[in-house]
Image: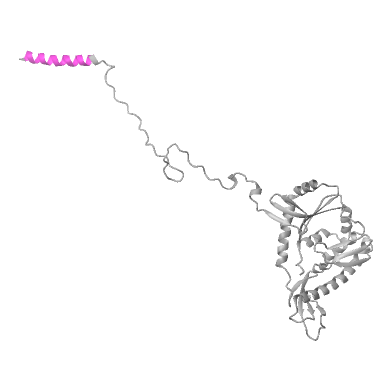
Amino acid sequence: MSRFLQLVLDMFDGATTKALQGLGADKRPSPKKRQPRQPKRLKPQSLMGGLNRDANALPPAPVLHGPHMPSVPLGQVLPKAHYAHPRATRRIQLGTTDVAYAFRRGKRRTIGMAIGPDGLEVSAPRWVTLGEVESALHEKADWIARKLVEMQERQQQLGAARIVWADGVVLPYLGDQLQVVLDSSSTLKKNSAQFEPSEAGMHTLRLGLPLNAEPQQIRDAVQAWLMRQAKALFVERLNHYAPQLGVQWQRVSLSSAATRWGSASANGAIRLNWRLVHHKRDVIDYVVAHELSHLRVMDHSPRFWETVQSVMPDYAQLRRVLKDEPLPPWS
């Protein structure tokens, strides 16, 4: 019995040893290697937070603003402007500005340009071609456009300051204020005028007119009085500066020009705008000295300005006042 049991045990041990010998040391099963865990793939999202249907689609291009925008010609951005001189004979397109200008030929050496209340005026020598005139205008296009805008704004300011001719109206006089008072009492003769100065700078001009006088009557009476004051003041200042400049004037007349303050002729005739009486006395003195200097130098060369400066050292500042302080329209 014991031998039988030993035989059975020996059979099991032999089978196990053969199985192990058949596998060999290098054929034993190795433990499985753990693969790295792949991260979960997220679905792409758009810039606005929504889901894209196409994972490969590119995000939308950002909208450009400000300096990142592509450049656009100024001609497509600036508003178009149109200026027409009432006596225009030619027209030109200067960038976004359409200009109809008054053109004339004369005895001069260069092409001249002037911008006044009516618009652009161009004068040229007789030998200059129209093509050369237009080339000169294109070269000065920025200057012309800027001056036309400035003149338009100035005219609008003047329109807002237009004088309303009625009792109590106030207007400038020698740098001060002058108030017009209608007085039909027996103390004033009909259509007469009486000036009452004031140290405070608000003078009074009493007119012998009824309170219901027409605006044109009031305007004409005030203008007549101002012109008399202007003529007397101009004569006084001409006599003051003529000896200093070594010149002699022959006669003086009043002007109502819209754009010129004065003029001088070689024969000694002087014309001065009567509306200079609205300005301060030193501004009037500058214009008087300017015109008297033309009796020595008839152009605006450096020698002319040296002549003006000899009696008016601050002429440049006074000249600027005439440009920067427009007077209310007289109508």
Q: Is residue 145 magenta?
A: no
Q: Residue furthest front?
A: 89
Label total for image: 0
Q: Is residue 17 magenta?
A: yes
Q: Nearer the viewer, residue 217 or 301?
A: 217
At a point 24% along the width and 16% down the height, the residue shown is 23
At a point 72% along the width and 60% down the height, the residue shown is 152
- Image x and y of residue 10, in percent: 13, 14
Q: Quadrant of residue 203?
A: bottom right
Q: Which residues are magenta?
A: 2-21
- Image x and y of residue 20, in percent: 22, 16
Q: In the rendered image, is residue 284 in sight?
A: yes
Chief secondary structure of the magenta portion: helix
Q: In the rendered image, is residue 200 in sight?
A: no
Above/below status of 14 relative to 75: above
- Image x and y of residue 49, in percent: 43, 45
Q: Nearer the viewer, residue 292 or 76?
A: 76
Q: Quadrant of the N terminus?
A: top left
Horizontally, residue 62 falls left or right of residue 112, namely left
Q: Residue furthest left?
A: 1
Above/below status of 83 relative to 226: above
Q: Residue furthest bottom?
A: 186
At a point 49% along the width and 42% down the height, the residue shown is 60
Q: Quadrant of the C terminus?
A: bottom right
Q: Quadrant of residue 154?
A: bottom right
Q: Nearer the viewer, residue 163 or 197?
A: 163
Q: Quadrant of residue 296?
A: bottom right
Render colour scheme: one colour
- Image x and y of residue 137, in percent: 77, 49
Horizontally, residue 151 falls left or right of residue 51, namely right
